[in-house]
Amino acid sequence: MRLPANLQGKVILITGAGSGIGYFTARALVTAGCLVAGLDIAVENLQALAQAVPERVLALPCDVTSEAQVKAACENVMARWGRIDVLVNNACLSVYEPFEQRTIESLSREVEVNYLGYVRVIQAVLPYMKRQGHGLIHNVSSGIGITGFAGASGYAATKGAIEGLTRSLAIERRSMVSSAT
């Protein structure tokens, strides 16, 4: 992965960085010279990366459904590197089953992780970014949030909510917010 020169050396916080897109994004950013704080409920993969390049990786166990854990993780990043330049909100939970079989509890869990998790992390990093006078918040979404998908009603609804949240925040904080679908 080749990064723009202006990202090299930046402190990037990635949620859902323990596997999948989040992990491979973290790995590519570290390889390209970024300082990466990876948050996830399972950090084994990140710990292996942190052992390989300890000066550039911080693996932090964090459940984005816990405001206290999110705040503590952000404070840890600030204590280590003194800034958070980029937030990549990527944590997600997807339950695939027909809508008629879904329970309110399982739908609520998707909302807690996929939408409110993003909100919690944004609320935690935004004050730091404002104090710094810069920062970028990048919310990872999905095309399913726009098109829908059979068996993915909760996931689709939360990703659609991320689209609306991102657009609203972009209006409020024009230079700080973007999304990828």
Image: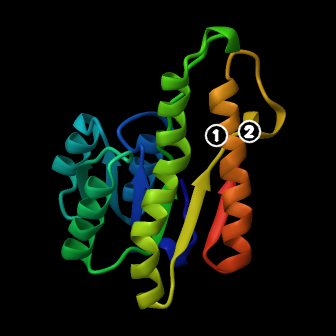
User: Which residue type does callout 1 highlight?
Assistant: Thr
Q: Secondary structure at mark 2?
A: helix
Looking at the image, is mark 1 or mark 2 earlier in the sequence?
2
83 shown above or below 115: below
Disc ID at residue 75: none
Residue drawn at (26%, 39%) of the image: 43
In this rendering, position of residue 153 left or right of residue 113 = right
- Horizontal arrangement in the rendering, residue 170 relative to residue 124 (left or right): right
Q: Nearer the viewer, residue 50 or 145?
A: 145
Looking at this rendering, what residue extends furthest in the right direction? Answer: 147
Looking at the rendered structure, the secondary structure element under dot 1 is helix
Residue placed under numbered mark 2 in the picture: 145
Q: Nearer the viewer, residue 1 or 157?
A: 157
Q: CA distance from mark 1 to mark 2?
A: 7 Å
Label tally: 2
Kind of residue indicated by mark 2: Gly
10 Å crowding of disc 2: few (<14), some (14-19), many (20+): many
Residue 33 on image: x %, y %? 38, 65
- Residue 94, image x and y in percent? 55, 26
| Mark 1 vs mark 2: in front | 1
Task: Point out residue 116 in the picture as x, y percentages from the top left corner.
Answer: 50, 49
At 65% from the left and 46% from the top, the residue drawn is 141
Residue 35, horizontal then vertical, whole percent: 33, 66
In the image, 95: left or right of 113?
Answer: right
**Quadrant of the image occupied by residue 142:** top right
In contact (CB < 8 Å): disc 1 and disc 2: yes
Eyeballing the image, is 28 above or below 75?
Answer: above
Q: Which residue is mark 1?
A: 158
